[in-house]
Structure formats: C-alpha cells, structure tokens
Amino acid sequence: MVAPELRGPVLDVGCGEGRLAALVVERGVAWIGVDSSPSQLSANPFRPVVLGDMRHLPFRDGAFGEVAHLWCLYHLHDPAIAIAEAKRVLARGGRYFASTGARDNDPEIMPEGYPRSSFDAEDAAEIVDKVFDQVQAERWDGTFFALETRDELRAYCRHNFIPAERAEGAELPLWLTKRGVLVRAVKE
C-alpha cells in the first residue's frame, strides 16, 4: 500500500529484512533502513542500513522526505516517542506512514482476538494525531493470502504467538482475514 507512493529519500524504521526496500529501490527511490536487530539487518540484502533505536534516530533534523514505521511500533511501550522522532527527521512537507494490525485480525484462527497492544489499528490514528496535525487512517479488511501448507500455518502461528494446536486443526488452504490500518500524516 505504501511503496507506490514513496518518492524518497525514505527512512524505513524497523526495516527488518528489507520488504519495503525490495519494492522501492528497484524504482530508484533513495532508501535507508534502520532496525534494532543485528540479525534482521544482516539478513537484509539492501544497503545502507543502520543499527539503531527508533526512539533516538541518528540523523539530522529534516533529513528525509518520508518516514515509514511499518509493523513495528507495537514493540514500544510508548510509540509516541518514536513517532515524534520520525517527525523530527522529516523535512517540512514530509510524509509519515505507520501500519499495524487490528485486535480482530485473523479471526479464522484467533476468534477471541488478539490482546490490546501499545499500537494497534483501533488506536493508531489517535496516537499519531498527538504528534502530527494532518492525519488520515485507511482501514483494511479482506482475505489477502492463503497459508497453503501445515508448515506455513505452523510458522505463522509461531511468529504471531498463536497456540500451536490451532495450526493442527485448521483446514488447508487457510485464507486469513487481515484487518488493520495504514496511517498517513504530513509534517507542516
């Protein structure tokens, strides 16, 4: 959803193994990744990357045209600190993006829903709105992909802290309903 909009230079905070970079670098967009995980950065084939904390970005004020926090802010107790730091490194008129899942994501294997996090779809726009003035939230709700094999389903459950026994009882292929939000903001 975000990659086609990016013009750069973009700071991909929580870049992990480079999923966003794979979509923008081929289009010639200037990209820099930041992550706090050395193993994620070593698995990321794109460069440059910086080992760093999203609450204390090692960049000057106004250095980037865009900053993305995709699927990472729920790792923080207070995500507003990282959002304010993203705003600091954005140029005037720069665009900010954040995404996260909803508590009622994956109802096929999590009918009771996920526990509340510090940054989930239900509260994300309100949290970003405390830092930025122009905030828009785009919710999604749809079946975007299927888990085809039992091993894929087991890995998905492990990664998302879903009880392992749910992977054994589900019918395959399992089409998961994905619910979440993309929040966009602009630095005035």
Image: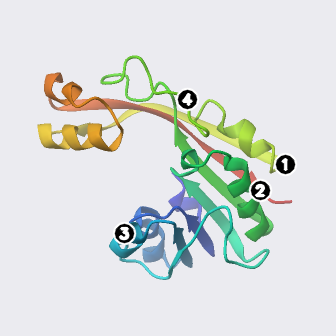
Q: How far apart are marks 2 and 4 (CA)?
A: 27 Å
- The answer to whether mark 1 and mark 2 are in CB contact below 8 A is yes
Please state which of the two labelled residues, at mark 4 or mark 1, is closer to the viewer.
4
Q: How far apart are marks 3 and 4 (CA)?
A: 27 Å
Q: How far apart are marks 4 and 1 (CA)?
A: 25 Å
Res. 39 mark: 3
Category of crowding for the residue at label 3, using alpha-carbon neighbours closer than 10 angstroms: few (below 14), some (14–19), many (at least 20)? few
Q: Earlier in the sequence, mark 4 or mark 1?
A: 4
The answer to which of 72 and 53 lies nearer the viewer is 53
Q: Which of marks 1 and 2 is nearer the N terminus?
A: 1
- Tag 3: residue type? Ser
- The answer to whether mark 3 and mark 4 are in CB contact below 8 A is no
According to the picture, the residue beneath numbered tag 2 turns out to be 186
Query: Judging from the image, what secondary structure is the residue with disc 2 in?
Result: strand
Q: Distance between the residues labelled 1 and 2?
A: 7 Å
Q: Earlier in the sequence, mark 2 or mark 4?
A: 4
In this rendering, position of residue 81 left or right of residue 29 = right
Q: Residue furthest front?
A: 77
Res. 133 mark: 1
Category of crowding for the residue at label 2, using alpha-carbon neighbours closer than 10 angstroms: few (below 14), some (14–19), many (at least 20)? some
Res. 116 mark: 4
Q: Distance between the residues labelled 3 and 2?
A: 32 Å
Q: Is residue 143 above or below residue 21?
A: above
Category of crowding for the residue at label 1, using alpha-carbon neighbours closer than 10 angstroms: few (below 14), some (14–19), many (at least 20)? few
- Tag 1: residue type? Asp
In this rendering, position of residue 104 left or right of residue 188 = left
- Tag 4: residue type? Arg
Q: Distance between the residues labelled 1 and 3?
A: 36 Å
- Tag 2: residue type? Val
